[in-house]
Image (spheres, rainbow, N blue to C red):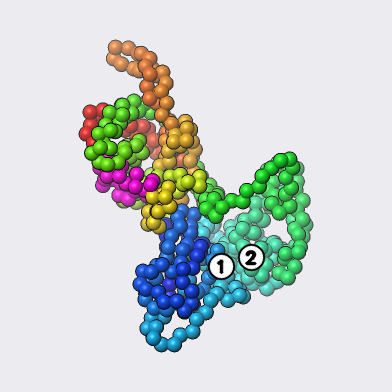
Amino acid sequence: MASVDLIMPKLGESIMEATILKWHKQPGDHVQMDETVLEIATDKVDSEVPSTAAGVITEILFNVNDVVPIGTVIARIKTGAEETVSFSTPPKDEGTRHKAQEAVITESIISPPQTTNFISSQARQTTNGSGNRFYSPLVLNIAASEGVSMTELENIPGSGNEGRVTKKDILQYVSERKAGVKRQTVRQEPAAQNQQEISIVKDSSPLTSHDSRLTTYQGNVEIIEMDRMRKLIAEHMVRSKHTSPHVTSFVEADVTNLVLWRDKVKKDFEKREGTKITFTPLFIESIVRCIKKFPLVNCSLDGDKIIIKKDINIGMATALPSGNLIVPVIRNADQLNLVGLTKQVNALADNARNNKLRPEDTQGGTFTLTNVGTFGSLMGTPIINQPQVAILAIGAIKKRPVVIETPAGDSIAIRHMMYLSMSYDHRIVDGSLGATFLTAVAKELENFSGEREY
């Protein structure tokens, strides 16, 4: 009888962990190949994990709501179910499981080269400090990069299992230290963790962080807890700003020809192709052409290596019914004509609104487009979707009087005008490249032929 490990699958280039939402199978249950075993969630999409073998579930290693690193064994399946097997569920004492979970660094952190030896030696030899506390490699990495000594680490109150210091704890400590916040008490012991409060004395700076457990709200207020996806999106956005030095460039485009062409063909297009043509595929078409001219905006950064992506996979930010945003990806957008782009855009948008996106629908993006004009905004300063290096925002199209230059002289005309903005990672994309690329996209839109066929 063979035992098969069920592994937490990789769900995207920037996704390092997933949350278990529901187990469809329990120890002792029979499972078929490709049958759904559990549901998981990331900051991008909810998904089902199928069985990789036919047999009997013998062991489940994690509980609902556990956050599990990618590549971790989450369950075991015995094949040849006619033999006697024993079953087990996640232990009540979760120390071992949490140690395994914390031992995986779930987020890339760029550290100065001189800290490497400190991190590796701490992780291998002294994962427990003088107080016999376990520190994950991630926590030690953050401590080393932020100059937090082992003595300071010992005095940070831990909110993890058995009072362990989590990533959230160390990041909060670093933030408070930079803001001038002083903690008056040392860490609480595990037994008294729930009873002991943390006293915080703040200086007069208005930028100091605060402990939400001690915050009181005056006046008539309503407190709403973030849902799971909103928490993950918030963490993803903060990580992006922390990782990439953002620069945003702006340009204005006269898209009158494009607007008039769409108005002319949209009824015939829908009748012939069975789907509506929006502005989004037209924007994507122009972006793809410019990426071919400036491939450096279609890359990612791995340490000091620039990874230029030969595939052009365009992510498009799409609003969900809950108000959250998700970014489905149009793969190989450069190989699709306008009809193909339109059908891909509409299919992905419909699936997003109906919660039918598959994990692969949000993976592998190399450049992102967000249409802030959909919500009435003239322009925006979007945040880069890691690990990409650029994101382009399209503003609302508005009619305005504009000076038209002609060989016969200048005149004023009513034109359809639109602002474009692009945020880019200044570690890779300099201002000249970012502005040149953005201007090229605007020129593609302005030079749109009103006589073209679709």
**Is the Cβ of the residue at disc 1 closer than 8 Å to that at disc 2?**
yes
Which image quadrant for residue 397? top left
Q: Which residue is at the front of the view, 182 or 30?
A: 30
* Residue 193 appears in the rendering: yes
Which image quadrant for residue 418? top left
Name the residue located 26 percent from the left edge and 47 percent from the top edge.
335
Q: Residue beneath label 2, please?
A: 160
Q: Residue beneath label 1, please?
A: 102
* Residue 330 spot, x, y in % from top left: 34, 48
Residue at the bottom extreme, as displayed: 84
Q: Tell me the CA gap for discs 1 and 2.
A: 10 Å
Identified by mark 1, the residue type is Glu
The magenta segment is: 327-350
Q: Which residue is at the front of the view, 347 or 454?
A: 347
Q: Would residue 333 appear left or right of 216 to someone viewing this image?
A: left
In this view, the mark in front (1 or 2): 2
* Residue 73 appears in the rendering: no
Decide whether residue 328 is among the magenta residues: yes
* Residue 399 spot, x, y in % from top left: 41, 23
Image quarter where the N terminus lies is: bottom left
Decide whether residue 85 is among the magenta residues: no
